[in-house]
């Protein structure tokens, strides 16, 4: 059974900004939107680390030079 944990950085108040993570699956970290618990991302640890680095540098921010629409 997958056990989900909500990010401490998720916003409350019905804004739909709720990220949940599961680390109890072998060789992967699962990520999902708690408001839509059906689909999820499954990332290998190295891919997750790369994604987190990109998020921290703003690569996915709208208007960022690295953001491609």
Image (cartoon, rainbow, N blue to C red):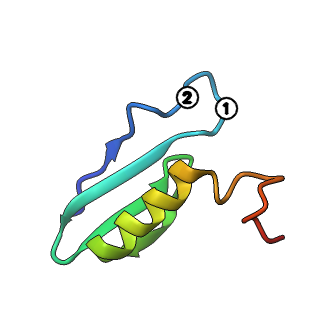
Helix, strand or loop status at disc 2? loop
Residue that appears at 78% across and 61% down: 65
Residue that appears at 22% across and 60% down: 23
Provide the residue designation for mark 1.
15
- The dot on residue 26 is none
Depth order, front residue of 30/39: 30
Q: Is residue 66 left or right of residue 69?
A: left
Helix, strand or loop status at disc 1? loop
Residue that appears at 71% across and 52% down: 61
Q: In this view, does 16 lie above or below 69?
A: above
Provide the residue designation for mark 2.
11
Query: Which of the 4 quarters of the picture holds residue 30?
Result: bottom left
Circle 1: is it few (<14), some (14-19), or many (20+) Cα within 10 Å? Answer: few
CA gap between label 2 and label 1 equals: 7 Å
Q: How many marks?
A: 2
Where is residue 62 shown, x and y percent of the image? 79, 53
Circle 2: is it few (<14), some (14-19), or many (20+) Cα within 10 Å? Answer: few
The quarter of the image holding the C terminus is: bottom right
Q: In this view, does 1 lie above or below 14?
A: below
Where is residue 22 shown, x and y percent of the image? 28, 57
* Pointers 2 and 1 in contact (C-beta within 8 Å): yes
Where is residue 48 shown, x and y percent of the image? 37, 67
Depth order, front residue of 36/60: 60
The quarter of the image holding the N terminus is: bottom left
Q: Is residue 42 left or right of residue 25?
A: right
């Amino acid at each position: 059974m997958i056990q989900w944990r909500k990010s401490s950085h998720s916003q409350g108040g019905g804004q739909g900004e709720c990220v949940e993570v599961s680390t109890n699956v072998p060789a992967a970290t699962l990520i999902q939107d708690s408001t839509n618990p059906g689909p999820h991302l499954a990332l290998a640890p190295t891919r997750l680390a790369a994604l987190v680095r990109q998020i921290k540098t703003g690569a996915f921010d709208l208007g960022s030079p690295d953001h491609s629409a």
